[in-house]
Image (spheres, rainbow, N blue to C red):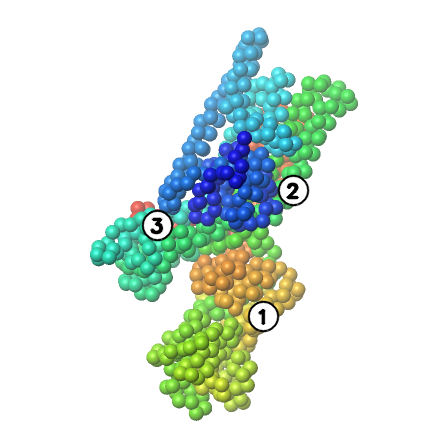
Amino acid sequence: MSTPASTAPAPKARGSGQFFRIPTMDCAVEESEIRQALEPISGIRSLGFQLGARTLRIDATSEAYPLALAAIRKAGFDPEPLPAAGSEPALEGAEAAHDHEHGISGGVWRMVLALAFAIGAEILSYLAPDTMAWKIGGMAVAGVAIGLAGLETYKKGMAALLRGKLNINALMAVAVTGAFFIGQWPEAAMVMALYAIAELIEAKAVDRARNAIKGLLDMAPAQALMLTPDGSWVETPVASVALEATVRIKPGERIPLDGVVIKGSSAVNQAPITGESIPVDKSTGDQLFAGTINETGELDMRVTAGANDTKLARIIHAVEEAQGTRAPTQRFVDRFAAIYTPAVFAIAIAVAVLLPVLTSFTWMEALYKALVLLVIACPCALVISTPVTVVSGLSAGARRGILIKGGTYLEDARLLKAVALDKTGTITEGKPKLVASRAWGSADESSAMQLAAALAARSDHPVSKAIALGLGVPSAEVDGFKALPGRGVEGTINGQRLILGNHRFIHEQGFCGLELEAELAIHEQQGRSITMLADDKRVLAILAVADTIKETSKQAIVDLKALGVTPVMLTGDNVATAKAIAGLAGIDDARGDLLPEAKLEAIKEMQQRYGATGMTGDGINDAPALAQADIGFAMGAAGTDTAMEAADVVIMNDNLLRVAETVRLSKRTHAILWQNITLALGIKSVFLVLAVVGGATMWMAVFADMGASLLVVGNGLRLLRGSKAPSVINKGSLVGQQEHPHAH
């Protein structure tokens, strides 16, 4: 009797969610059944399936767990909460790997024995004398083969039939039993053995695709060299390293945790995070990420994130969540399979009943044909065709620094007709420099610059940072500081209310006279961004900042246009600067002076004009437009958490080329999805016709099913080619490091 959800032991929590073992879940069809059972339940955030280990991770609200377990049991499965254990990531990973490998190796040996007995049954049927004793012996050998290969299939099949469901296990159980009792026992044994082997291969292939991204987690070392209070350096498990601790990374070693450099300089290979293996120079104040490789110099860093909260761990968790969602094609296939299987079952019954009545076929021949149809009715190749492809696509993207938050976005990116691009940090470097500054009117130069520096130092906007860095003067204390998205900042210094804002904001205050406008026009025509300091009555200073476009921006625009995607620049900067930068990048449509709500309206207008529209940005003021767009792209490494949360795709290396690469990956994924569906249905259709009008045997039917399944799995896994992160050996020295080509 199943344990009631309310009295179940506490499941094991690893990272995010609770883990359950489901002994009878080992193929994609059963995964699909569980997904469908859980889909109506609200409060489930993500699901993580491991078919080889037969485990399911459910990340949900506390109220949703009992409902989820009840739904899984109603679907005919018995989830067993995994017992509590240590929480160290290394221990969990080793335990999961052990369980997985133990399950796979045990299954392989059982299948080998089953196949050997099935072959023995075939040999006896052909070579042994036609006597009752030999027949009974042959049937016994066949029975052993069926028992070894198909005991679980029978259990699951009978459970499904008792619930009135026609799943793959029910079909195989009926087909093999029928064949055995009409005297085709050698064929029944071989069919069951081959079917079980195919199921094992499929489960391992799906897990391989699903676990492809987890190889990155192995790049973060389990130990860190930490500075202790007594001044000594001690090798410490990363899970035990506290925030703000000091960790030392020697040349050639992998960085164990996220942190900030406090001493030393080096070149760091950031491929596990960004997909780019070109080393990046790091020195005091620069960020370091777990799993990246310190190549040249010794670095000391201050730890800023725990082992389970590093950027690498969050990437992997996000991909796992994305894999837990069903893509549109997968939902279509599941709905189709729900109709296809009963339809073929009905055809099989009609063949068994009507063929002897309407034709010269005997009842035994008609029954055999019906059993062949039951094997053909198995939807395994069809159902497995989509998840393995989608999961491979998500993993391939993540390895290249493209974090796609679900199969829906992976499939829909190919439909984009236009992409809106923010200017600062997306098309440009986002590292502007102060190129001109002056007091305005009768304002004191020294005092104005100190006030401007004080306000700019409090803002995290790239333009403000450039002003603070460029002025380099002592800053005063700011009270009541407030950021005004799309406009600037304001605050009070020594009792005086001040604003540091862009051209539009100062114009709204009514401070822009003819002389000031003429001065601003000179700067704006050169593509400079203008910021002004003002009090309640007048402008006190003008500050001009210039940014340069990224080296990759021009090629990214060319790539988007080649894919039929129209690029449009949307920026809060002035129109003159927007047009100047757009001209350099090759963008024909540039729109400036846009507040966050205006960017939102621009996205809506583009959706009406072009159709499916993407948005690429990196700041707080981009979040509303990112959410409105059909697909939002956040530039991850330099982007804000707000933008990354609002986006559907995160470009981890800030490389605009990755937007076009996402569209190409989407097109390739879509093509492979429909290749797989066509392959699976085409092979099934051919053998369906052969079974009714020709001479198809159960052998042929199971080979067709097995062959189609392996074909679609292999085809789906092709997406992982060319997306591998650089390999490492020993303590993280890089081997075979090279820039990977773009996936086409």
* Residue lying at the far right of the rendered structure: 358
Give neighbour class at mark 1: few <14, some 14-19, many 20+ (Cα, 10 Å).
some
Residue at (30% x, 51% y) in the render: 224
Under circle 2, the secondary element is helix
Q: Quadrant of the N terminus?
A: top right
Write down the residue under mark 1: 597
Judge by depth and name the residue closer to the eye, 667 or 23: 23
Distance Cα–Cα, label 3 vs label 2: 44 Å
Residue 169 x %, y %:
59, 30
Write down the residue under mark 2: 335
* Residue lying at the far front of the rendered structure: 7
Judge by depth and name the residue closer to the eye, 723 or 224: 224
Q: Is residue 129 above or below residue 428?
A: above
Judge by depth and name the residue closer to the eye, 505 or 18: 18
Mark 2: which amino acid?
Answer: Arg
Mark 3: which amino acid?
Answer: Ala
Under circle 3, the secondary element is helix
Residue 421 x %, y %:
54, 66
| Dots 1, 3 in contact, CB < 8 A | no
In the image, which is nearer the foreground, mark 1 or mark 3?
A: 3
Residue at (35% x, 54% y) in the render: 257
Under circle 1, the secondary element is helix
Residue at (65% x, 25% y) in the render: 371
- In terms of sequence position, does the residue under pointer 1 or pointer 2 come before the other? 2
In the rendering, which numbered label is found on residue 239? Answer: 3
